[in-house]
Amino acid sequence: LVVLSACNTGRDGAESDRGEGFTGLTRSFMYAGADALAVTLWPVESSSAKRLTEEAYRSLAMAEDLESGARALAFARAKRAMLARPHRIVLDPLDSEGGSISTDHPFFWAPFILVGDGQ
């Protein structure tokens, strides 16, 4: 399992999309022999991406025999954990008003998808 948690790792630019499926980094890793990749479909916020990835790997480590669909299940559990235990992220640390947003919003957990073998 390879996790590419930078922005838009599951897509190339919109101008290169000709219905060819996954391109760019995703295709390169698959050709190189990766069984599965967790990639992002839009820009990600660093601390929530880190938390989601840690939750997914924690879930994988607890899977006793890596049952069928363990990778997919691990990421589903991680997304549910983000919903169940949200954090608040300060939008602008220099803003004296201290505006923030909760990480239970899909922007923070939904960009991650699993490509390849979900087992």
Image: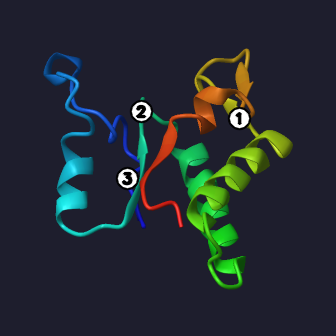
Image vertical order of residue 93 relative to residue 22, above or below: above
The answer to which of marks 3 and 2 sits earlier in the sequence is: 3
- What SS does tag 3 mark? loop
Q: Amino acid at mark 3?
A: Leu
Tag 3 and tag 2, C-beta contact below 8 Å: no
Q: Which residue is mark 3?
A: 4
Label at residue 41: 2
Quarter the C terminus occupies: bottom right
**For mark 3, does the 10 Å Cα neighbourhood hold few (<14), some (14 to 19), or many (20 or more) residues?**
some
Q: Position of residue 63 (x, y in %)?
A: 69, 77
Q: How far apart are the two marked residues, 1 and 2, measured between alpha carbons?
A: 17 Å
Pick the residue in front: 29 or 51: 29
Pick the residue in front: 96 or 23: 23
The answer to which of marks 1 and 3 sits earlier in the sequence is: 3
- What SS does tag 2 mark? loop
The answer to which of marks 1 and 2 sits earlier in the sequence is: 2
Quarter the N terminus occupies: bottom left
- What SS does tag 1 mark? loop
Image vertical order of residue 26 relative to residue 107, above or below: below
Q: How far apart are the two marked residues, 1 and 3, measured between alpha carbons?
A: 20 Å
Q: Amino acid at mark 2?
A: Leu
Q: Which residue is mark 1?
A: 103
Q: Quadrant of residue 28?
A: bottom left
Left or right of residue 106: residue 39: left
Image point 83% across, 46% down: which residue?
A: 85
Image point 26% across, 35% down: which residue?
A: 21
Q: Quadrant of residue 61?
A: bottom right
